[in-house]
Amino acid sequence: MKLLNTTLVAILAILSFSTFGQLKVDQYGRIGMGTNWPNSGYKCHIKGNMLLTTYPDYPFIEFQFKVGNGWPGTEIGSSVDKIAFWSSYVGYHKLYAEQFYKMSDASYKFESTQIISPMSKISLLKPYKYFYKSDYISDNGDSLTENIPQYGFISQEVEQTLIEVKITEDGKDGKLMDYDQIIPLLVAGMQEQQKMIKGLEAQMARLIATNPNYNSNSGGNGNGNSNNPIDKSKLFSNSPNPFSASTNLNYYLSANTTQAEIRVYDMQGVERKVYNLNPNQGNSFVVLSGSDLPMSGTYIFALFTESQIVDAKTIVKQ
């Protein structure tokens, strides 16, 4: 009997040593894997990586949780390229985070081209205000539905409009949409619109500069004191004019000007030089170098305050 007891104690000791740091259940029911000291804040504490797999069943799928793997320190990934935050109780889940980064490295992209006619593509999109049906589980465990007001698009309409790219995906409950794909269109559209605006501004500058009857004091774009029509931002003739080496572009900024610039155009409307002005200078000038203009001829310099054209005059380079 004494030999039997000794044998049982030895077996238990061997089992204790063999399970050290492999699987531990403490007195509170906390499980430790790879550690004998489960963290008191968790029911399950795993030291190392965790793998969920369908193996040996088909299809073979792995879901991996990795820690201490270098940059960025943790990884969550799968052997398939799609991970859905979804459950049969509420459908797709809301995700909250500080920032999201998407892969956009040049090494993954090829045959890059400019977006053609972005404004026409944007004009075909139909934004809506709607109520989105969102299912959730209450604190009491009841399945409820909340109608959330949102702005957005309809996936079926967008995929028929933006046929050049794959912007939608068939999900579990309906069509999903990659809203990030809209951002490059908006940027390209704004750039295209800005070119159009600059072209119109150049045309307006030419009309003002070549109109002998234009009076900057009588206009409404001087951004001066409405009770003091004399206090209007305006240009004076450049000196010398004509010029070859350099000339002073003379101007006056009204007292309440907050943003101002002078732009120099050729007669085809091409912007050749831009000067950002100090709005607190009042009467002042900037120096235009002849080397900034490609050839002899007539040019236009225009004054803009608060992004509106105020005055324009012609200059001649010999």
Image: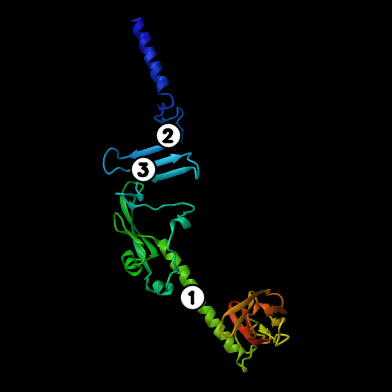
Q: CA distance from mark 3 to mark 2?
A: 16 Å
Question: Considering the image in quadrants, where does the N terminus appear?
Answer: top left
The image position of residue 235, as x and y in percent, is 67, 84
Q: Quadrant of residue 298?
A: bottom right
Question: Is 102 displayed left or right of 314 in the figure?
Answer: left
Residue count near mark 1 (Cα–Cα under 10 Å), binned few <14, some 14–19, many ≥20: some
**Image height of 212 relative to 259, above or below:** below
Q: Amino acid at mark 2?
A: Ile
Q: Position of residue 47 (x, y in %)?
A: 45, 33
Q: Dot 1: what SS? A: helix
Residue where numbered disc 3 is placed: 63
- Residue, disc 2: 46
Q: Spot the residue most to the front.
A: 295
Image spot of residue 33 (x, y percent):
41, 31
Relative depth, front residue between 203 and 130: 203
Residue at figure coordinates x 26%, y 42% from the top left: 58
